Image: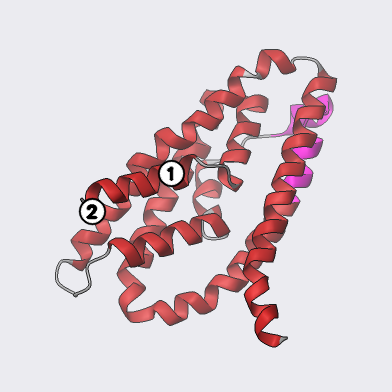
Amino acid sequence: MPEFALLSYVALMSITPGPNNLMLASSGVNFGFRRTLPHMLGISLGCGLQVFIVAMLLAQMLGWLQSWRLPLAVAGCVYLLWLSWKIAGSGQPEARQQARPLGFLGAALFQWLNPKAWVMVLNASILFMPAGHAGKAAAALLLALAFAVVNLPCISVWAYGGERLRHWLAAPRALLLYNLLMGGLMAATALWLLYDELAPVLAGRA
């Protein structure tokens, strides 16, 4: 049952904690579910487009894609550390008034720097694309649609959960502590992902 396996894989990878979901939970708290919708749509459609492009190019350019994965992952982790700093400071009332949620385009482009998204997309392309060239475009399109459709409700859980916490975090001090926690978790995630990417390289040079 390859269809069930694909849907299960996408759902599991989409709903588990990662950079996207931590950002959505923080955005839900600070801006609410409705204002976070462009961010969510950017993630889902950006991930769908990413998997379509990667799946189409996989057969011919797997080596090239792999060579780009490390620099993109490092850039993504550095960007996540910067986001961690911004999230940690967003609980201050004066900073919150000036802040804006991440938009559709920014969220879509971020998927190309998100190490977890690269793992999810490359693994799905390897596991679920047909071996031959026949029907490759149709298979890549179906894979992209599966990612976009299954991903959206899964990540929405995080934004909705963040919004539900808003009334508990009405006090500026409580909101500041929450955003410090989320920023710390984001930084820890970025450092873990960076270590996971660099460890094989460092081990090979040892």
Badges 2 and 1: C-beta atoms under 8 Å apart?
no
Q: Which residue has dot 1 on it?
A: 12
Where's residue 198, x and y in %? Answer: 67, 72
Decide: is 202 above or below 144.
below
Where's residue 162, x and y in %? Answer: 61, 26
Magenta region's main secondary structure?
helix
**Residue at 75% over, 15% down:** 170
Inspect this view and state whether residue 177 appears. Answer: yes
Three-letter amino acid code at the position of disc 1: Leu
In the figure, residue 101 lies in which quadrant?
top right
Q: Which residue has dot 2 on it?
A: 2
* Coloring applied to the structure: secondary structure
Inspect this view and state whether residue 145 appears. Answer: no
Dot 2: element: helix
In the figure, residue 140 lies in which quadrant?
bottom left
The magenta segment is 82-99
Seen in the image, is 39 located left or right of residue 44?
A: right
Mark number, residue 54 = none
Three-letter amino acid code at the position of disc 2: Pro
